[in-house]
Image (tube, rainbow, N blue to C red):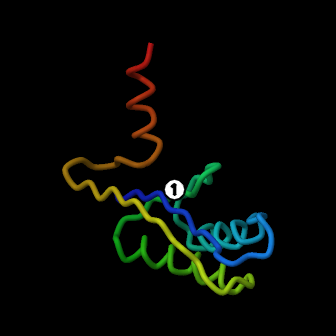
Amino acid sequence: MITADFAILPVGNDTTECKDFVAAAVQAIKDSGLSYQLTGMGTQIEAETLEELYSAIAKAQEAVFKAGIGRVYTVIKVDDRRDLDDRGLDVKIETVENMLD
């Protein structure tokens, strides 16, 4: 399982509001069929292959362009772990939460 955290930042917007661009990007991820979690600072997704992952992010980035922005800055963090099976986002969170008092 490959997990990633990414944020697509519109550059050159006339206002500080980004919600329309965020919604466009998240809709593209939702349409990809990949499991995802929207957070207050980005979006986390799970994929079986790097091709799936990068394709979904590319479609999200393209959706932001189609929403009317002329430039985007995308930050991607990828965890491609192959030594254990089924290490999705929920399992990673549960592992740490189980360690807390």
| Left or right of 66 on screen, residue 7 | left
Label 1 neighbour load within 10 Å: few <14, some 14-19, many 20+: many
Q: Find residue 63 and report its horizontal and vertical position in percent.
A: 65, 81
Quadrant assignment for the N terminus: bottom left
Residue closest to the far top: 101
Q: What residue type is labelled 1?
A: Gln
Quadrant assignment for the C terminus: top left
Q: Find residue 70 and report its horizontal and vertical position in percent.
A: 66, 87
Q: Find residue 99 and report its horizontal and vertical position in percent.
A: 38, 21
Q: Which residue is drawn at 54% across and 74% down?
A: 73
Q: In the picture shown, does residue 69 fall above or below 28? A: below
Q: Find residue 32 and report its horizontal and vertical position in percent.
A: 56, 73
Q: Based on the displayed image, in which of its 4 quarters is residue 94 positioned? A: top left
Q: Residue at x 61, y 50 (%)?
A: 39
As helix, strand or loop, the secondary structure at mark 1 comes to strand
Q: Which residue is drawn at 19% across and 50% down?
A: 83
The residue pinned by badge 1 equals: 44
| Left or right of 100 on screen, residue 12 | right
Q: Report the front residue among 70 and 43.
A: 70
Q: In the picture shown, does residue 18 fall above or below 41? A: below
